[in-house]
């Protein structure tokens, strides 16, 4: 066996996962020039080009894609050896860094995490919330391991599996009886500017030449619901979240038009991270628990 395979394949794997020589160097606690030279050495040894530069990150060439299963196999063997000779009492120890859009985190994620921790009590789990765009970038840069988002990135590096469907409603004061009651005189409350759920409603109104109501960002979901309860405006929210917080009591929850109502939540994870045992166990649990799973 050429010893350079053992030395350079882990470096190749880090660059493939992180999409950057600089980030790989930081993760490996070395300098960028060392990472670059190790990748170049591997390319020379194999006689192929392994990476090409994309718009935002290095991407694997077809030859790099072919090499990935071997790098992953080497990583798995290394992990098995480590676990065997360290004689861990619990081989399922580890960490799991999750992300989710806030409405999903508040309504569904807690139950899923509880099911996982029942089977893996020694795994440390952290959860952070952010927008779909921010979460997609965090998964791509390996800042988090997996995330629940409201749209696909359509990035070949990501596994993107639909796991839950929801309907959007307009949460409004009890004086509202239909979407037609919304006028430019009403405020639309959002957690943050650029909310994709609210964007659907505004696009719908624009296509019908209806005047757009002003947008007010309130920062938190609690502030958003409280604002509706206090008559400061209306809000577009997933029905599952409205039901979870009991916000519909005394308020109107008006379904959005059918063409903009349906929301799909996707579980996203880097494909090259799935050999990591704890992460793979979590993904398999989520896929088994989705409504259409056999």
Image (cartoon, rainbow, N blue to C red):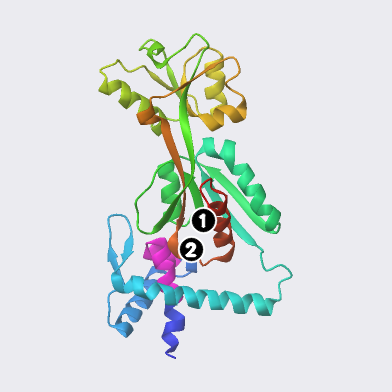
Label 1: which residue? 145
277 relative to 169 in the view: left or right: right
Labelled pair 1, 2 in contact (Cβ < 8 Å): yes
Q: Is residue 267 above or below residue 284?
A: above
Identify which residue, 267 or 276, lies in the foreground.
267
- The Cα atoms of the two marked residues, 1 and 2, are separated by 8 Å
| Image position, residue 58 (x, y; %) | 32, 62
Query: Which residue does the image show at 32% across and 83% down from the upper left?
Result: 46
Q: Which residues are magenta?
A: 10-25
In terms of sequence position, does the residue under pointer 1 or pointer 2 come before the other?
A: 1
Question: Which image quadrant for residue 150?
Answer: top left
The extreme bottom residue here reads 1
Q: Does the rendering let one see residue 137?
A: yes
Task: Report the front residue among 136 and 152.
Answer: 152
| Disc 2 residue crowd, few under 14, some 14–19, many 20+, Cα 10 Å | some
Residue 26: x, y in percent?
46, 64
């Amino acid at each position: 066996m050429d010893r350079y395979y053992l030395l350079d394949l882990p470096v190749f794997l880090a660059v493939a996962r992180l999409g950057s020589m600089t980030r790989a160097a930081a993760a490996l606690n070395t300098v960028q020039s060392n990472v670059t030279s190790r990748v170049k050495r591997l390319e020379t040894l194999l006689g192929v080009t392994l990476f090409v530069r994309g718009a935002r990150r290095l991407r694997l060439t077809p030859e790099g894609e072919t090499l990935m299963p071997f790098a992953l196999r080497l990583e798995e063997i290394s992990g098995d050896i480590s676990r065997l000779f360290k004689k861990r009492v619990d081989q399922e120890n580890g960490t799991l860094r999750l992300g989710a859009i806030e409405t999903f985190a508040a309504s569904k994620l807690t139950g899923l995490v509880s099911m996982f921790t029942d089977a893996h009590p020694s795994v440390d789990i952290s959860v952070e919330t952010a927008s779909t765009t921010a979460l997609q970038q965090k998964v791509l840069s390996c800042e988090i391991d997996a995330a629940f988002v409201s749209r696909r990135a359509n990035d070949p590096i990501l596994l993107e599996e639909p796991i839950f469907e929801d309907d959007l409603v307009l949460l409004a004061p009890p004086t509202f009886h239909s979407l037609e009651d919304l006028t430019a005189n009403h405020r639309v409350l959002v957690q943050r500017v650029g909310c994709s759920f609210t964007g659907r409603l505004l696009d719908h109104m624009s296509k019908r030449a209806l005047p757009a109501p002003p947008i007010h960002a309130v920062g938190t979901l609690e502030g958003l619901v409280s604002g509706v309860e206090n008559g400061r405006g209306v809000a577009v929210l997933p029905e599952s979240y409205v039901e979870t917080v009991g916000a519909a009591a005394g308020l109107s929850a008006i379904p959005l038009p059918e063409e903009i109502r349906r929301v799909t939540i996707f579980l996203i994870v880097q494909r090259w991270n799935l050999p990591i045992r704890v992460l793979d166990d979590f993904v398999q649990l989520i896929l088994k628990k989705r409504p259409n799973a056999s």
